[in-house]
Amino acid sequence: MATVLLLRHGRTTANASGELAGRLPVDLDETGRGQAVKAGARLRALPLAAVVSSPLKRCRNTVELALPDADVVEEDGLIECGYGDWEGKQLKELAKDPLWPVVQQHPSAANFPNGEGMAEMSARAVRAVRDWDAKITAEHGPEALWLACSHGDVIKAIIADALGLHLDQFQRIVADPASISVIRYTPTRPFVVRVNEGGDLGTLVPAKSATTDSDAAVGGGAASGAV
């Protein structure tokens, strides 16, 4: 089977301000644009058979900066989780919501008001990636490489599935802005080849957080340890 490179979009204005963007049309900030270009310098060396992207602006712009000559196909299955009423709100305020500990500790049971459930998000994202992988394998062979640009929680859910983890454990995974994770699917099992590669090592310095040290940044956050 083919190998998929999961690229998270670069940092956005919402990431920088601690806002949960969800499906709002936020764009990359200056740092995010630089991250996309830097990721592209690595990706352009690869013979990518296809480039697929979430239709949201921040993903499309990340791909356009990273791979300006690529023929990009939009895939609705890779769109950000539908956070519903949470969209556009500050994470420090959302951390006080009764749903927050459910998202942190039992995300498979989390359903966002006027949005979608995290289990629903995981199922459609995994299905989209597996369907595309099978299609690309059929057209280009099992050695093919392809790129999927998506969002933090979506990528974490895809990785968790490949690792055989229950969705309730996906908050243990980190996908920084413009990081690359790699999965190679086979007829019997996926192989997780890379996770969160290429992130800025400066993000390893703990940042001040409005939530507890054990809380994951819903939506992926700006970088490791930050909301």
Image (tube, rainbow, N blue to C red):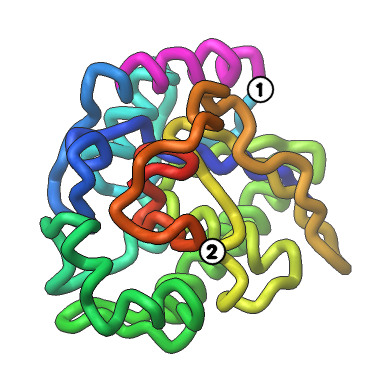
Work out whether residue 52 can be spotted: no
Q: Position of residue 44 (x, y in %)?
A: 56, 15
Tell me if residue 39 comes above or below residue 214 in the rendering: above
Q: Which residue is mark 2?
A: 171
Identify the mark nearer the N-term, 2 or 1.
1
What residue lies at 84% left-to-right and 65% top-to-bottom?
Answer: 189
Q: Nearer the viewer, residue 226 or 40?
A: 226
Q: CA distance from mark 2 to mark 1?
A: 32 Å
For label 1, the crowd category at 10 Å Cα-Cα, with few meaning under 14, some 14 to 19 and many 20 or more, is: few
Magenta stretch in the rendered image: 33-46
- Residue at 17 percent across and 72 percent down: it is 84
Q: Position of residue 29 (x, y in %)?
A: 22, 25
* Magenta span main SS: helix
Residue 34 in magenta? Answer: yes
- Does 56 sit above or below residue 63? below
Q: Quadrant of residue 36?
A: top left
**Residue 218 within the segment the image draws in magenta:** no
The residue carrying mark 1 is 47
* Residue for point 57% across, 55% down: 132
Residue 183 image position (x, y, % from top left): 71, 48
Q: Nearer the viewer, mark 2 or mark 1?
A: 2
Label 1: which secondary element: loop
Locate residue 24 relative to residue 227 in the image: left or right.
Answer: left
Q: Is residue 52 left or right of residue 172?
A: left
Q: Is residue 92 above or below residue 122?
A: above
- On the picture, is 27 further left or further right than 217? left
Q: Viewer-proximal residue, 57 or 224?
A: 224
